Amino acid sequence: MLYRSKAPFRLGIAGGGTDVSPYSDLYGGAILNVTINLYAHATIRPLNNGKIRFLHINENIVEEFDSTDRLPLIGPLLLQRGIYNSVVSRFNDNQPLSFELVTSMDVPSGSGLGTSSTLVVAILGAFGEWLKLPLGKYDIAHYAYEIERLDLKMAGGKQDQYAATFGGVNFMEFLEDDKVIVNPLRISNNILQEWAMNTVLFYTKQQRCSGHIIEEQVENVKKKNDSLEAMHKVKEEAFRMKNCLLREELWELGKALNVSWTNKKKMARHISNNFIDQIYETAISNGALGGKISGAGGGGFMFFYCPGNTCYEVASKLAEMNIGSIQQFEFSKKGLTTWSVKE
């Protein structure tokens, strides 16, 4: 049998960074995001040869081990190792498993769409399908967070795991004691289609390590400097943009994106740079109302809200810069999906 899963990547519309501790613990975080039809994929094929084999398609990395209850947490496929160790410890009484795990992603790593967290959710989905793990949506999202942030000590927040698991348009609240509330927004299909039609998604081809930016944000919260006030304003914009969507005011959403981006850049020094500013100014000068980087910043994907038919001019001018590429997409209403088939 093959045990498969896929989980969607997300666009971080507003509130990014307020889901990161200690900000979310001290002040409460608020995030607005939406998933798109680009995915992380995972397939598990059980083996009977006493081996564990990992294959990550995007980077053509293969790792193979003798079956054991714990893999060393070193090497390029750290996520796969950490997930295996946790699943065996928590759900299989420390009894080793033998299998092949094949993973792939529709976008590059470090591109600002929550790639690592989404991949963790997809892999957990495949294990859940294989081992029939008793995990609901909140369980999977929190489990993915624990593996990535606590077990593997990777810097970051909580929104990506919940977005990948739940899917759709969600307003998320992050409170003290690790409490998370996911509020799915009921957005009409007409508004969803118009929102997607008017959004230009642009890949800067600059991959970045979000951990450094997030670590600086954490320090800024502790120091209570001007960046902390910017985080408060970014959170306020998340509430504002949620209301714009519910009232079907996409024009106001576009303008709010511009305000949110202005404040987001103040949260840490390397969120933007001259290269990113040039892209942003090109989009705005050709009709976009607002936009931002999706994710921590420093590179990856940017998106812009372009009313009417301005999306064509914005896309054309960005393409002419020859520094990135336009990514076609649609919004996805479904989160983590799992299934099994005979090989």
Image: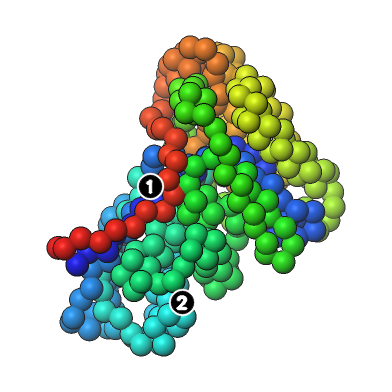
What residue sits right under mark 1 in the picture?
A: 39
Estimate the spatial distance between the alpha carbons at disc 1 and disc 2, rounded to whole Å.
Answer: 23 Å
Disc 2 is placed on an element classified as helix
Q: Position of residue 181 (x, y in %)?
A: 64, 54
Is residue 75 visible in this depiction of the protein?
no
Q: Considering depth in this image, is 292 or 322 the residue closer to the camera?
A: 292
User: Residue 166's x, y, as percent?
Assistant: 49, 51
**Residue shown at 69%/38% (left/top)?**
238
Query: What crowding class fits label 1: few (fewer than 14 Cα within 10 Å), some (14-19), or many (20 or more)?
Result: many
Tell me which corner region of the image, top left, top right, bottom left or bottom right, holds residue 67: bottom left
Q: Residue at x 67, y 64 (%)?
A: 178
- Please, which colouring scheme is shown? rainbow
174 to 306, vertically: above or below: below
Give the residue drawn at x 42%, y 45%.
334
Q: Position of residue 125 (x, y in %)?
A: 39, 62
Q: Residue at x 42, y 22 (%)?
A: 319
Q: Secondary structure at mark 1?
A: strand
> Are the residues tagged 1 and 2 within 8 Å (C-beta)?
no
Can residue 130 be seen by looking at this rendering? yes
Label 2 neighbour load within 10 Å: few <14, some 14-19, many 20+: some
x then y, percent, for residue 222: 81, 58
* Figure label count: 2
Please say if 79 is above or below 109: below
Q: Judge left or right: residue 107 versus residue 143.
A: left
Q: Amino acid at mark 2?
A: Ser
Query: Foreground residue, 284 or 275?
Result: 284
Residue denoted by label 2 = 86
Figure quadrant of residue 107? top left
- Label 1 or label 2, whichever comes before in sequence order: 1
Type of amino acid under label 1: Tyr
